Image (spheres, rainbow, N blue to C red):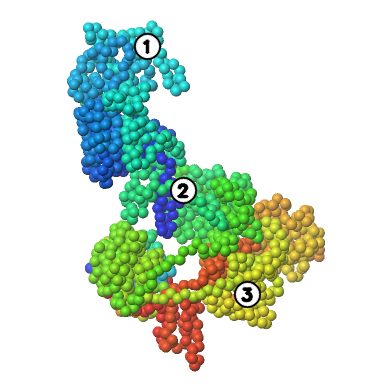
Amino acid sequence: MVRPSEYDVGLIGRKATYKPYAQAIPGGFAIEKLDTAPCRMACPANLNVQGYVQMVKQEKYREAVQIIMQDLPFPGVLGRICPHRCEKSCRRLEVDEAVSIRELKRVAADHVDLMEIPVPEIVPKDEKVAVVGSGPASLTAAYFLALDGYQVAIYEAMPEPGGMMRYGIPEHRLPRNVLDHEIENLKRLGIEIHTGTEVGKDVTLEELKKHGARAIFVGTGAWRGLKLRIKGEEADGVKDVTSFLRDAHLGNLKKIRGKALIIGGGHSALDGARLALRMGADQAHIIYRRSRTEMLAEPEEIEEAEREGVKIHFLVAPMRVAVENGDVQGIECIRTRLTEPDTTGRRKPIPVEGSEFFIEADHIIPAVGQEPDLLFMGDNSPLEVSKWNLLVVNPETLQTNIPGIFAGGDVITGPATVIEAVEAGKRAARYMAMYLKGEELPTEWIEEPPMGNNWVEVPDDEPTKHRLRISTLPVEKRLSGFEEVNLLADETSAKEEAGRCLNCGSCCECYQCVEACKANAITLETHGQKRESVVLQVGAVIMSPGFEPFDPNKYDTYRYAIYPNVVTSMEFERILSSTGPYQGHLQRPSDEKEPKKIAWLQCVGSRDINRCDHSYCSSVCCMYATKEAVIAKEHAVHELDTAIFFMDMRTYGKDFEKYYNRAKDEMGVRYIRSRIHSIDGDPETDDVCLQYADENGVVRSETFDMVVLSVGLETPERLVQLAEGLGIELDQDNFVQTGSFSPVETSRKGIYVCGAFQEPKDIPYSVMEASAAACGAMANLSGVRGTLVQEKRYPAERDVSLEDPQIGVFVCNCGTNIGGIVDVPKVAAYARSLPGVAYVGENLFTCSQDSQDRMKEIILQENLNRVVVAACTPRTHEPLFQETLKDAGLNKYLFEMANIRNQCSWVHTGQKEEATEKAMDLVRMAVSRAQLICPLPQPTISVDDKALVVGGGVTGMTAALGLADQGFRTYLIEKSSELGGHALSLLTTWRGEEIHGPVKDMIDKVREHALIEVYKDSTISETKGFVGNFETTVSQMGEDVVLKHGAVVMAVGGDESEPSEYLYGDDDRVLTHLELDHAFNQGDKRLESSTAAVFIQCVGSREPERPYCSKVCCTHTMKSALKLKELNPSMDVFVLYRDIRTYGQREELYREARRNGVIFIRYSMEQKPQVQKMDEGISVTVRDHVLGRDIVIQTDLVVLASGIVPHDNASLAQMFKLSLNEDGFFMEAHAKLRPVEFATDGIFLAGMAHYPKPIEESIAQAKAAASRASVVLSKEQLTVEGVVSHVDELICRGCGECVEVCPYSAIELEEREEGRKVADVREALCKGCGSCAVACPTGAASIFHYDDEEVLTMVEAALD
Amino acid sequence: MSQQFNPKMIAFACNWCAYSAADLAGVSRFQYPPNVRIIRVMCSGRINPNFILKAFEMGADGVLVAG
C-alpha cells in the first residue's frame, strides 16, 4: 500500500522507502519505520508477517520463504496448521476481515523448493549440542543452533523425526511430504538426526554429556494421554487420541469398524474423529461438555469435520464406559449447562441432574489432554519436575535446574501448538548459545517493551473486500484416503489477498532494498538504526523550526476536502514543480487535464478571526500567489486565465511592486478585490464556481477549472509545546515574543529565533534573521571561536613539472545510471587506447568513500600525474575528487571530468550506441585537455581583522556593536555630527516601544565600546584593495585618515521623500510622517484641537516615477491615527489609501484603528484626492468607490505618508564597485539567498540603504551583515582560487582593454619603470571568467587552466 | 536525399549558467539529439572568436555559445 507523500503534500503516494526531498543534494533516500505490525507482535515466534505477505504480493515466493526462515524452519507446516493468532490482531478487521495470513504462508512455501535455496554461510564452531526429541521445539532449537555454527545431534525415540507434527497431526491436514522436505532441509545445515534412539533407555543424558555435548535441549513433548477418570476406561476399545493417531500413522492400526466416539473439544478431538472416518468407522461422534463457541478448533475446521459426517454433541459429559465381555458397548453421558463466565472468563459446565442418556459406540477415544512422559530422565534424575509432571525451567532462558540442560515445548507447557513450541526452541537456542559462550544468563523474566501503536493510518476510503476463501477437496473424495483437504490457493487470488494487507509497520523489513542497493548504502545495520537521544553541551541555541501551512478544512464553505480541484497553495507549488507529482506539467488533480482558468483566493487562514482566530496577515501570500499565477501561465501549453481574489495587495518587499505590476500589466493576471464567501462545485465536471461582488458592487458568478487557496502560515501545536519546554515566551498568535531592538532574541537568554517562528515572513528576511541569530550566538561564543576546529593536513605536493603526462582515467557506472545506458567497458577500453593514458579503471560508484581510497592508492602505485573521471558533473563532484588528488599529493588542478551521465546516459536514454559513442568522445576531449593542464598555485592572502561600517544610524551602530562584541575592531563612519540617524526623530515602534531611549543607550554603548572608533562629520573619499585588505581614506572636517580593514558594512540609510503635492510646503497644516512624530514629541496643540485629520497614503510611492512601496508608511499611519484618536477621541480621522499594507502582526493595528472609528477610504491612482486650501481649514476631496461619489472632508490636519528614498549612493557605489538598482538602492548579491552580501567579496549591506524597512528589520539585517562580515574577519588567511587571470608584463602594452572588460574590477594599470604602464591582476578579486584574455590585443592576458590551447584542444578532440 | 543530415555541434557553455542548465536537463531526463559536444568554460566572456572559427575549420556544422 502506498502512503501519501509528505513532500508532494499528499497529491501522490510514496512507499516506505522514499526520497524525502526530491531536490536535495545529495538526493538521499529514507526508510520509514513505524511500530512493529500487530500481526508480528501477535506471533509467538515473532514472524515477520508483513514482510512475507508483501513478498507474496510481488510473487517473490522465494524471498517470502527466506523471510519466514529467519524466524522458523517450517513454512510449509505452519502454512497449514498454525492457529494463526496473527489474523486475530490484523488491523484489516477494522475495515472488513483479517488477511488470510496463514494461507499466504502456504502459498509461498508451496511455490519454493527449499533445496534450491543455498545453505546460508555458517561459521562452524567446535562445540557439540545434543537435542532430545525431534518435535517442533527440538527441530527449531537445532535449526538456530546449527545456523550459529554448533554441531547438533538429535536423538529421537520414534522411527521418524517430527514428533507430534508427524505422529499427532493426521495427514489430511499435514501431508508428510511437506514435513519430510522441511526436515530434510535441516539436515543440510549439518544437523544429525538419530532416530530410534530413546534417551533414557538406549543412551542417558549423562552419556550424551560424556560424548561431548556441552549443552542439551530436551524437547520430548507430551505424549501420554490423560485419563477420563471414569469407570470402564481401561477396556480394550478405549484408546486415547494420541495413541490412536500414532498407531494409525505407524501402521499398527489399519482399519476400524463401527461407531467411534471421541471425547473432547480441541484440535485432536476433531483430528481423531476425522481420522476415524478415514480409517473405516461408520460413524464418528464427538461429545463435548461445553458449547460450540468454546471449542478450541477454528470454526472452518469444525465445519469441515461436520461436512465429512462427524456429529458433535455439545453440552454432554461422559459418565461411564459401558463394557460387556471386555468389549466397549457405548458410553453413558449426562447433559450439562454452562455457568455464567467466572473471573477468568470461562464458563464452567455443570451436570444437569436426571439428564443421563446412553450413546452406543464401538470405539471410545478420549481427547482430553496429554502430559509428558518423562522416561528420558531415567531414575533418580536431579531434574526438577512440577506437580503437573512438567519440567521446571527458567521462564526466560528455558534452562532447567541443571546448568547446560534446557527444555522447551510440550514438556514444559503441556500440550500446546507448534508455533509455541517453535518459540520455545528459538528462545532456548538463543540462551544456549549464550551459555556456550560463557556469558551470564538472566535469572528473571525479561518483559518485552510494550507494543506501540504508531502504525500507518488506515485510509478512510479503503475499499472493503472479502478475505480469501480457499477451496477444499470434495467430501466424497476425502474419506477414501488421506489426501489433503485444504487446497492451495491460486496465485492471482493470493496476490490479491496479500494486497489487502495495510502495511501497518510501514517498512515491512523484507530487506529487498538491501539487496537492491549496489552501493551498500542500505545495510541490515541501516535498518537496525534506532532513535537515540544525544546530549549536547552548547553555549547558544538558535530556533528555526519554521511554520506549518494553515489547514483549510476549517473553512467548510470552501469545500477543500470535498472538491478535488480546490487545492492549497502548497499543493499548487508541488503541481508546478518539475520534481512534483505531475513532473511540472500543469494539470488538475481530478482528471489530470490542463486547467484553462485558475482562481486564487487570498487570506485563507489569515486576517480572519471568525473562522481561524488568525488576525495577523501571513505576509507572503500576495507575493506567492502572484508568482504562482505567473509561473502557471508560463507552464501552460494553452492560454491560461488566472484571477487572484484579494482584499489588499501586499507587495511591500524589495522589487515586489515591480513584479506585481508586471504580472498585472504584462502577463495579464487578473486581480479582483473581493473576498470569496463560498465555493460551489460541479460534480459532473469537477469545475468550481465562485460568486463574488466586484468593485462596483455587482454580483458576478464565474466558473474555474481549479481554485488555489492561498493558505496562511501558522505555528503548529508541537512548536507551542517545544517553546513551552524551552521556556521561551510566545505572543498571542503563538509566534516567539521578541523586541524591536532585539529582533532575534527570545525571552530566554542565549536562545535565539529566526524565520517564520518569530512572525510570518519571506525567504530574504528569514535568511537575514538567520545570520542575525548567528551574530547573537557568536557574540556569546567569541571566546571559544575555532577551538573545536580540526585542521586537515595534506601530504606535500609532488612536483610533476618534469614528468610526461601519466593520465589515470576512472570510468563510473553510477550504479546503473550510466552503466545501464552507456557501455562502460567499451568506454574504458577506448580510454586505454588514448595517448598519455597510463591507467584505466571502472567503478560502480566512483564517488563512494572506498572508491576514493582506492583512487588514492592507484595514483600512488601507478605514479599518475593527471586524473580524468568520466562520471557526472564537475559542478557537484569536482571538489570531492580534487580532495582525493590532494590526499595523494597531487595539485588539485591536475584533474578533469567527462560528464557522461548528465550529458549522455540521462539525455540519450533510448540511444545506447550513440550515448556510448558520445561518452567516448567526451573522454577523448577530457584526456586531450588533461595532457595540457598544469598545477596551479593557490596563493593565500592575509586578512586584516578590522571592519569599516559606513553610516552611524541604528543600522550602522548595530552592525558596529555586533562586530565589536565579537572582538573585531570597528571603524564607524558618520557623515553628520551625531550618531542615531532618523531613529531619533521617530516616536514609537509599531509595537508601541519607545524609540528615543534605546537609541540613546545604543549611542552610549558605541561611544564607550573599547573596540569601536567613531568618525563623525566624516565622509569616504577613496578606497582601495579587496576582501581582507581594504584601505579606505576618510575625510574628517578636511583632514584625511587612512584606515586599513578587512570588511565593510554599508549602512548609509535612506531619507523621507519630500512631497511635491497636496499643498505640502504651502500650508503648515500639511505634514509628513516625520513631522507628525515631531509634533507629537513637541506636544503641538494643533493635534488636539483639530476636529478632523486626513492621512493620505502612498505619497511619492507606487507612482510611475517611484514605483516601489515604501513598506513602513501604512503601519506608521495606523500608529499615528490611533494616537490622534487617543488625544482627541471625537476627532474624525480619515485614511485615504490604495492598499493597506499592514503586513504580519501589524494587521492588528489596522483592526484596532477600524475599531476605534478611523475611517478608511480607498482611492485609485486615476482619481487621487484633491487637497484645497479654504478660508477656514483645508478641504480634501476623494472619490468613494463604494458610493461612486466624491466625498469632501473639512480638516485642519493633513498627514502625507511620504515615501522613503535612498541617498545619492552613486559615488560610494563607484568607489566600492557596488551596484545600485533602478530605484537607487544598493543591490545585494542574491535577493533571496544572499540578502546582506554584495557581489563584491568582503562588503555587506544593511538597513534602508538596501530598501525601506522598519527598525526591527534594519537591526536584524545589521546583525546579519556583522555576522557575515565576521566570517571573513575571523580567518587568518584567505585562499585564492588558482583559476585566475595573469598578464605577461613583457608583452603587455598597457592599453587597458582588460581593465575595461573586467566585470570584477580585478585588473588595474600599474606604473613600472620609466613610466611604462602594465596591467596588474588582483588575484583575490579575479573570478577567472577570462574576458581579459579575449579582450587583450597582444595575448599578454591569459587565464590559468583555460588558456587558448587548453580550450582549443577540446574543440579539436571533439571533432577529431 | 537518402542519408539524413546529422550535423556536428559544439557548444561552449558557461560554468555558472548554461553548463548547469545542461546538468539540469540531465537531472530532468530531457532527451535531446546526441550530436552536440559541450565544452565547459568559466564564462561565455572567455570565448575567443578564434575558438568558433577553429570549430568550423575542424568541421563543425554549428557552434552554440551559451552563457
Q: Secondary structure at mark 3?
A: loop
Viewer-side residue, A470 vs A954: A954
Is residue B33 shown to the viewer in this render?
no
- Tell me how far mark 1 sits from mark 2, CA to CA: 62 Å
* Circle on res. A335: 1
Q: Which residue is mark 3?
A: A1208
Viewer-side residue, A791 vs A1067: A791
Categorize mark 1 by other alpha carbons within 10 Å: few (<14), some (14-19), many (20+): many
Q: Earlier in the sequence, mark 1 or mark 2?
A: 1
Q: Nearer the viewer, mark 3 or mark 1?
A: 1
Q: Which residue is mark 2?
A: A532
Vertical relation: A1205 (above or below) A590: below
Left or right: residue A962 versus residue A346 is right
Q: Earlier in the sequence, mark 3 or mark 2?
A: 2
Given the image, on which type of amino acid does mark 3 rest? Asp
Is circle 1 on the same chain as circle 2? yes
Viewer-side residue, A1105 vs A926: A926
Q: Nearer the viewer, mark 3 or mark 2?
A: 2
Host chain of mark 2: A
Q: Position of residue B21 (x, y in %)?
A: 41, 65
The residue at the point 49 percent across, 45 percent down is A563
User: What is the quadrant of residue A230 in the picture?
Assistant: top left
Host chain of mark 1: A
User: What is the quadrant of residue A745 in the picture?
Assistant: bottom right
Categorize mark 2 by other alpha carbons within 10 Å: few (<14), some (14-19), many (20+): few
Q: Quadrant of the C terminus of chain A?
A: bottom left
Q: Secondary structure at mark 1?
A: strand
Q: Secondary structure at mark 2?
A: loop
